[in-house]
Image: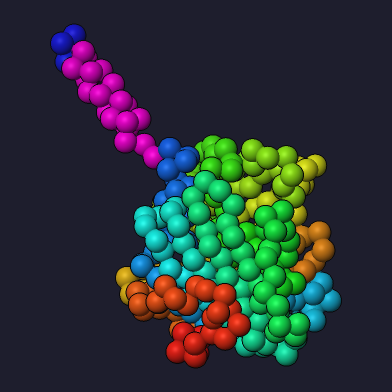
């Protein structure tokens, strides 16, 4: 009997040790989430409808094509190109990002009204992206090394088992003090994010409202960012989403910021 108890205890310890050895750390959870959200496929293209809704219910719609291409593994170099179709005040405007691991991304905006390419300063990455509730940084994603990540709990959200990870910025110049992310355990997509201000009050919420399979990749095709303090919200819908379309390197140049090829933007 004593021998049996010792064997059972040994098995229990072994199981616990194996569990701890193979457990996913908070840093790994966030890396997997970023890979699933921003790095799937070799490249990606989608027609994007962005609806800006004021507290009073007034709506403005921005339509654009977004293209991105990966250069290396998830979390590595990446390039984005966005072309605006409407409304009239942003028509033919283009936005380009060169994203690098471990340092600030380079961002450019071509403004056709003044026929000028403007460099977006690193400090402006937290500014609103074309009047929406998303920032310039939100468009291409935040460098995970800029935050400290910890697992807060595990719970269901929208009927799915999730990790809830707290990400605290290492720098003090952020507009929020920390963020909570609900990460789907099955595919690691971020289903919800809550942003808390310097006083610890919830002020902004991101939700993944629709997930579809696109060429075998689970893809968030509808998302919303709500500012609880201003009452403003932004809804983003991806149509004609596609992966591995063969985007050419030459697209990501100042030349095409001013005159993008029709075959890629339409």
Of 61 and 222, nearer the camera is 61
Residue 139: image x %, image y %? 59, 65
Q: Looking at the image, how many numbered discs can be counted on the residues? A: 0
Magenta stretch: give its range. 5-24
Residue 224: image x %, image y %? 63, 68
Name the residue at 39% across, 40% down: 24
The reply, left or right, for residue 12 in relation to residue 201 is left
Picture layout, residue 258 above or below residue 25: below
Q: Where the N terminus falls, by quadrant? A: top left
Q: Tell me if I can see residue 161 in this picture.
A: no
Q: Residue furthest front?
A: 255
* Helix, strand or loop for the magenta stretch, by majority: helix
Name the residue at 77% across, 69% down: 232
Name the residue at 59% across, 60% down: 106
Residue 6 is covered by the magenta coloring: yes
Q: Tell me if I can see residue 57 in this picture.
A: yes
Of 169 and 77, nearer the camera is 77
Name the residue at 59% across, 52% down: 104
The reply, left or right, for residue 57 in relation to residue 67 is right
Residue 97: image x %, image y %? 56, 65
Is the image coloured rainbow, by chain, by secondary structure, or in one colour? rainbow
Residue 103: image x %, image y %? 56, 48
The reply, left or right, for residue 53 in relation to residue 136 is right
């Amino acid at each position: 009997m004593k021998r049996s108890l010792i064997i059972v205890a040994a098995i229990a310890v072994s199981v616990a040790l194996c569990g701890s050895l193979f457990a996913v750390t908070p840093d790994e959870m966030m890396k997997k989430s970023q890979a699933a959200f921003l790095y799937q496929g070799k490249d990606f293209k989608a027609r994007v409808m962005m609806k800006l809704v004021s507290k009073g219910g007034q709506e403005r719609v921005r339509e654009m094509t977004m293209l991105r291409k990966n250069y290396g593994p998830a979390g590595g170099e990446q390039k984005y190109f966005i072309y605006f179709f409407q409304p009239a005040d942003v028509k033919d405007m283009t936005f380009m990002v060169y994203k690098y691991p471990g340092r600030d991304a380079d961002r450019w905006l071509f403004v056709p009204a003044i026929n000028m390419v403007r460099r977006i300063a690193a400090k402006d990455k937290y500014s609103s992206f074309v009047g929406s509730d998303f920032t310039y940084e939100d468009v291409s994603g935040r460098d995970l090394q800029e935050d400290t990540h910890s697992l807060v709990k595990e719970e269901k959200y929208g009927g799915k088992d999730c990790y809830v990870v707290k990400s605290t910025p290492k720098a003090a110049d952020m507009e929020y003090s920390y963020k909570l992310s609900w990460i789907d355990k099955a595919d690691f997509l971020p289903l919800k994010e809550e942003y808390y201000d310097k006083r610890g009050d919830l002020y902004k919420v991101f939700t993944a409202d629709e997930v579809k399979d696109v060429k075998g990749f689970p893809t968030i095709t509808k998302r919303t960012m709500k500012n609880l303090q201003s009452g403003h919200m932004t809804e983003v819908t991806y149509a004609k989403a596609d992966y591995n379309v063969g985007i050419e390197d030459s697209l990501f140049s100042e030349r095409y910021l001013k005159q993008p090829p029709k075959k890629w933007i339409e």
